[in-house]
Image: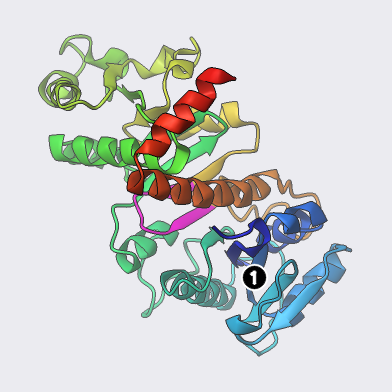
Amino acid sequence: MKKAENIIVGISIGDLNGIGSEVVLKTFEDARILELCTPVIFANVKILSFVKKTFESMSTLHGIDHLNQVVLGKINVLNVWKESIDLKFGENDNIIGKYAIDSFVAATKALKEGQIDVLVTAPINKYNIQSEDFKFPGHTDYLNKELQGNALMLMVQDKLRVGLLTDHVPINEVAKKLTPSLIIEKVETIRNTLIQDFGIRRPKIAVLGFNPHSGDNGVIGKEELEIMIPTIKSLYEKGTMVFGPFPADGFFGSNQYEMYDAIVAVYHDQGLIPFKTLSFGKGVNFTAGLSKIRTSPDHGTAFDIAGKGIADHNSFKEAVYLAIDIYNSRIQHEEITKNPMKIKEKQLEKNNR
């Protein structure tokens, strides 16, 4: 097994006019995190040195031109480009968007090839990244293609985990996409990630209803009766501990969510509004369903405060920690899968404490 500091955390720098570079540098000012991993920032050491000076960061940067030059325990900056860039914090700039994607594409390639162990992505601006070479709504869709997975957005903060059946889909299109096959696919993805990535042997999953009051037995919509209830029942009968659909309005306020290992929301705001309210700025976006590990903070570029030195880095820091934890959990899961007796040993140890 790798030593902690040998875990290579690749970081795509995101939109340099936003708060991404600030929260990255703030995260690694704490030298203790370098005892848990070795960061590699995909950017340019000159531009990050400028950012470091702007925010009077105490981080010490180590510039490299190739990944075989990584120094363990240092903040490595891989020079993805050499040219100078003019930053204008808080402004939307297509040129900056191009560099954000250059960083992300290079980091994804390194992840695919095993040159980094996990990937943490700083926020991008979805408007300025579009080009002839990059026609994806964001990080997740590109990763899904490159890693040939079944990507699912799972928001995580401690034991609160909220997954989405549909993510960046307009509200008026959600009902059309709500099918038995989608529910089965996403619930099974969440079940597998809870086992493999979070070490939960028999996860309990709650599914929220689509309509107000979960349709009130068909009075306020038929989706629950015709699609969701039969599908959830079928999954349960096959051994998946999945329950619902629960009326979404009172589910979080009544603390019902604490009874489950994950909650599945039907659409973006149904899941993310309560999640962000409860996670207190420490939430993490984990892309479940991929062969490789990617996390990100649960916020965007925050152009309104970019360049002011007041950005909260806690969500990015938690994204780094979660990526490391999941990496270690996957190693343990693989070992246990190869040697089932370890499950009994671990259970005996737990019982004897």
Q: What residue type is labelled 1?
A: Ile
Residue position marked by numbered label 1 in the rendering: 41
Q: Which of 339 and 189 is in front in this view?
A: 339
Q: Is residue 292 highlighted in magenta?
A: yes
Please state if 309 lies on the left or on the right of 218 as rendered: right
Q: Is residue 160 highlighted in magenta?
A: no
Task: Point out residue 304 in the picture as x, y percentages from the top left corner.
Answer: 69, 52
In the image, what residue occupies the spot 67% across and 49% down? 317
> Which region is colored magenta?
286-295
| Quadrant where the N terminus is found in the figure | bottom right
The correct choice, above or below, for 193 with respect to 160 in the image is below
Q: Which of 299 and 346 is in front in this view?
A: 346
In the image, what residue occupies the spot 22% across and 15% down? 215
The correct choice, above or below, for 92 with respect to 211 in the image is below
Inspect this view and state whether residue 297 appears. Answer: no
Q: What element carries label 1?
A: strand
Q: Which quarter of the picture shows residue 134?
A: bottom left
